[in-house]
């Protein structure tokens, strides 16, 4: 359907009406050659992409309709049983809720904080390069190392966090951090913010550099206050960067795994479990690969729907001109 | 090759042909199961001893066996624990097992036996395997037939700090569950954390439930429940209730729900640093306590899991596991000879001395010098019943569900009935 629609628009309405003439035929041949060349050059990449990305996705979709232990080919077809079971599973429903929670917290706290730091460090202050580097540094650490590190820092009674709080007379704020079902998500979010705000800050800084200084100067001449300058110049011109940063943040929250696995393994009692952790548990601990595939399919669907909707409705303007068709002019 | 004018293309073709030929030949070689056409039998031995000193000791033993049997070659393949499990699952599916392979017995071995892949050793090994420690042989006896020979055995029990027990005024380790709960209360009253637990690693909590189920419902019920896919019996609910009674005393260290087992702030270190009085753990506990923490030295004691009043089980029934070897269904006689060699007194003395296992050959006992392991061995020798670790006795999903549900019970989010129902549900889905 789609391809017919596309080719129709491209060749124009009268292409169908006129009988083919000699130059037309030559043009068609040229175009076929053009296509063949393109396909030829893309074949190796397409083959790799197909075997390593598309095929596994399709196979996971296939396996999600079976009860399958992971060895041999799936044979015990169970229809949509895995999916029905999934949406009755308290742990998985909890995963969805925690995913939403992390997305919400990231958008409401982490990204605004990163923006504030970026605006601050975009000003002429002494040692700003040092600050920028320091705030970005956590992003360079692997999630696994971050997990081990904060597991030690937040160890109840013996960890650095409780010692520091105790030393400044705030013993009351010390607690069980990752070990208490009621504080584990907050602690986890704190660590995520520590690790990722520097990355978003860097994105914003790059965006801020590209805002022409003349605009701000003109606004100052016009008597705009700092809030007005931020609200009416910085923010609108930073919008493309913000939209990309929100996109990355949401996708990151949906797929969160390493950090959680290392620091809590989803515990205590599933209170920090994410979809990816649940999938791992079922796939590689219980060998219920069919069910784990169903989880991965749902994760994929959520990511895909979000990504497509976001590109369609939010990133549309930013992507204009970035996408190309075969002839190299804009879509 | 004699042609001096061999062109470049010809040379390439010749090389390729030679390469293909070699590959094909070597393919034949590995496919023929070490046929004895040349008079030499090759026996493949797959094990999980990838760390020193065991790795070296075992390789030397294989050499010794080869020297005693000039017509046999032992080909060793060593794989790390998890990699081995994965590889064996694939091999079981394909129906091609190595001649001699590591096994923990229980459910996995049972599956391989049902598939007709494992040699029945009942008659061929009887003359010399009768003398082995009875409890060590248990995991490999299925339907009254022997399918494996042990080289290691161990058990779970309470490791406790004598000094802390003394401080709380407890004169002797408790032998009943109510006395145990009293001891926990006494320790708390004396300002001592009674128990250390690694809540992050759910298998540590499962030990309590498994032992309680053995004591209330009995060992036979644990086997029957798995066969019938029904864990809802009164004995299992009761086991959960007893565990809940313990949890309600808040006996565990602060933040135990997030604690790991062997990390510097984990369960073993908490006991090893004298910050908790007890942990329920296997024969390896003293080593880990001293490794992750400082270790409590001569203050360390060991007592078996208490009996529960009115329950079907007794205090001499043990929960544990070990390691053994099984044979491929049509493995050569040389493989059986190797098992005999590996379970001989001379070999076992060497294993006990050099690799720190508990002897499975009673005559090798004198080689055991480690005080802590001697404590465990005393219990093992007196054992009247044996239950293999649940995650090895049951299918992986059922074992994980037990761990997961019991963790919920300990965290306070699940009731004893929830636990038995969740395990039953998973067991039914698995069949």
Image (cartoon, rainbow, N blue to C red):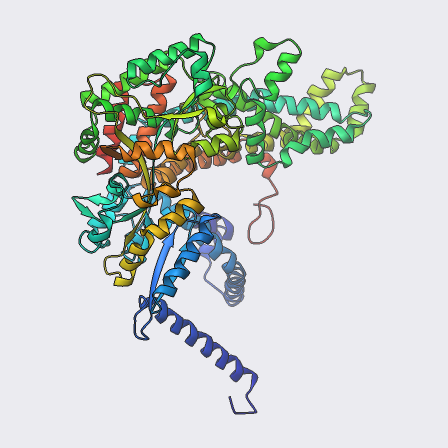
> Which of B9/B57 is in front?
B57
The structure residue drawn at horizontal position 23% and vertical position 28%, both measured from the top left corner, is: B424
Residue at screen point 33% across, 24% down:
B208
Please identify the quadrant where the C terminus of chain B is shown.
Answer: top left
**Foreground pick, B32 / B78:** B78
Q: At which x and y percent is residue A70?
A: 33, 46
How far across and how far down the image is residue B409, in percent?
A: 34, 20
Looking at the image, residue B358 lies above or below residue B411? below
Say left or right for A278 vs A322: left
Q: Residue furthest front?
A: B366
Closest to the observer, A160 or A92: A160
Q: Residue at x 22, y 55 (%)?
A: B119
Look at the picture and state if B267 lies above or below A45: above
Residue B99, horizontal then vertical, whole percent: 30, 58
State left or right for residue B231 relative to residue A316. Answer: left
Query: Toward which corner of the image does residue A164 lie, by quadrant?
Result: top right
> Is residue B421 in sight in this rendering?
no
To which quarter of the image does residue B331 belong? bottom left
The mark tally for this picture is: 0
The reply to whether residue A331 is in sight is yes
* Placement of B304 over or under A168, stated as above or below: below
Expressed as whole percent of the image width and height from the top left, the position of residue B150 reads 30, 46
């Amino acid at each position: 359907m789609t391809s017919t629609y596309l080719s129709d628009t491209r060749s124009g309405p009268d292409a169908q009406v006129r009988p083919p003439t000699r130059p037309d035929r030559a043009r068609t041949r040229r175009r076929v050659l053009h296509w063949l060349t393109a396909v030829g050059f893309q074949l190796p990449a397409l083959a790799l992409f197909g075997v390593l990305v598309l095929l596994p996705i399709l196979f996971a979709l296939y396996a999600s309709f079976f009860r399958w232990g992971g060895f041999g080919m799936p044979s015990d077809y169970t229809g949509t049983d895995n999916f029905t079971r999934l949406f009755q599973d308290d742990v998985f429903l909890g995963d969805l809720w925690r995913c939403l929670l992390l997305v919400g917290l990231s958008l409401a706290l982490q990204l605004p904080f990163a923006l504030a730091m970026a605006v601050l460090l975009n000003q002429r202050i002494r040692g700003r390069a040092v600050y920028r580097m320091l705030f970005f540094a956590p992003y360079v650490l692997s999630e696994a190392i971050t997990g081990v590190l904060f597991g030690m820092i937040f160890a109840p009674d013996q960890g650095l966090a409780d010692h520091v709080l105790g030393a400044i007379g705030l013993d009351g704020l010390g607690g069980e951090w990752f070990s208490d079902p009621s504080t584990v998500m907050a602690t986890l979010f704190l660590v995520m913010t520590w690790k990722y705000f520097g990355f978003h800050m860097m994105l914003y800084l790059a965006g801020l550099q590209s805002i022409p200084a003349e605009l701000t100067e003109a606004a100052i001449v016009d008597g705009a206050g700092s809030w007005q300058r931020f609200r009416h110049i910085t923010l609108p011109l930073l919008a493309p960067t913000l939209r990309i940063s929100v996109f990355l943040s949401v996708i990151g929250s949906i797929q969160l795994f390493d950090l959680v696995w290392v620091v809590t393994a989803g515990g205590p009692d599933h209170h920090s479990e994410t979809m990816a952790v649940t999938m791992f548990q079922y796939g590689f601990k219980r060998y219920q690969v069919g069910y784990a595939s169903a989880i991965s399919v749902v994760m994929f669907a959520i990511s895909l729907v979000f990504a497509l909707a976001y590109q369609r409705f939010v990133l549309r303007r930013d992507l204009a001109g970035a996408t190309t068709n075969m002839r190299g002019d804009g879509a | 090759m004699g042609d001096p004018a061999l062109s470049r293309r010809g040379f390439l073709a010749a090389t390729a042909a030679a390469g293909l030929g070699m590959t094909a030949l070597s393919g034949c070689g590995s496919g023929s199961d070490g046929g004895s056409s040349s008079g030499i039998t090759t026996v493949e031995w797959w094990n999980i001893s990838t760390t020193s000193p065991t790795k070296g000791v075992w390789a030397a033993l294989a050499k010794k066996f080869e020297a005693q049997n000039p017509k046999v070659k032992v080909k060793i393949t060593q794989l790390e624990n998890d990699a081995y499990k994965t590889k064996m699952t694939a091999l079981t599916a394909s129906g091609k097992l190595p001649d001699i392979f590591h096994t923990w017995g229980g459910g996995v071995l049972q599956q391989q036996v049902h598939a007709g892949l494992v040699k029945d050793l009942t008659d061929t090994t009887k003359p010399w395997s009768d003398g082995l420690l009875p409890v060590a042989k248990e995991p490999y006896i299925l339907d009254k037939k022997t399918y494996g020979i042990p080289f290691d055995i161990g058990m779970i029990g309470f490791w406790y700090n004598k000094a802390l027990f003394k401080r709380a005024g407890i004169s002797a380790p408790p032998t009943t569950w109510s006395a145990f709960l009293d001891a926990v209360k006494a320790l708390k009253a004396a300002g001592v954390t009674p128990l250390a637990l690694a809540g992050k690693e759910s298998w540590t909590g499962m030990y309590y439930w498994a032992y309680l189920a053995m004591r209330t419902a009995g060992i036979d019920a644990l086997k029957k429940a798995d066969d019938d896919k029904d864990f809802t019996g009164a004995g299992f609910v009761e086991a959960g209730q007893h565990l809940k009674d313990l949890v309600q005393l808040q006996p565990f260290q602060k933040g135990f729900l997030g604690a790991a087992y062997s990390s510097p702030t984990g369960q073993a270190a908490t006991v090893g640093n004298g910050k908790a009085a007890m942990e329920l753990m296997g024969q390896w506990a003293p080593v880990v306590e001293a490794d992750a923490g400082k270790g409590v030295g001569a203050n360390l004691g060991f007592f078996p899991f208490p009996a529960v009043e009115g329950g079907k089980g007794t205090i001499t029934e043990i929960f544990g596991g070990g390691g053994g070897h099984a044979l491929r269904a049509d493995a050569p006689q040389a493989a059986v000879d190797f098992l005999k060699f590996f379970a001989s007194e001379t070999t076992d003395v060497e294993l006990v001395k050099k690799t720190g296992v508990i002897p499975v050959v009673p005559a090798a006992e004198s080689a055991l010098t480690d005080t802590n392991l001697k404590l465990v061995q005393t219990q093992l020798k007196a054992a009247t019943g044996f239950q293999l670790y649940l995650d090895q006795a049951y299918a992986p999903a059922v074992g994980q569900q037990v761990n997961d549900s019991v963790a919920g019970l300990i965290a306070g989010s699940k009731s004893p009935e929830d636990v038995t129902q969740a395990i039953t549900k998973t067991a039914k889905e698995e069949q």
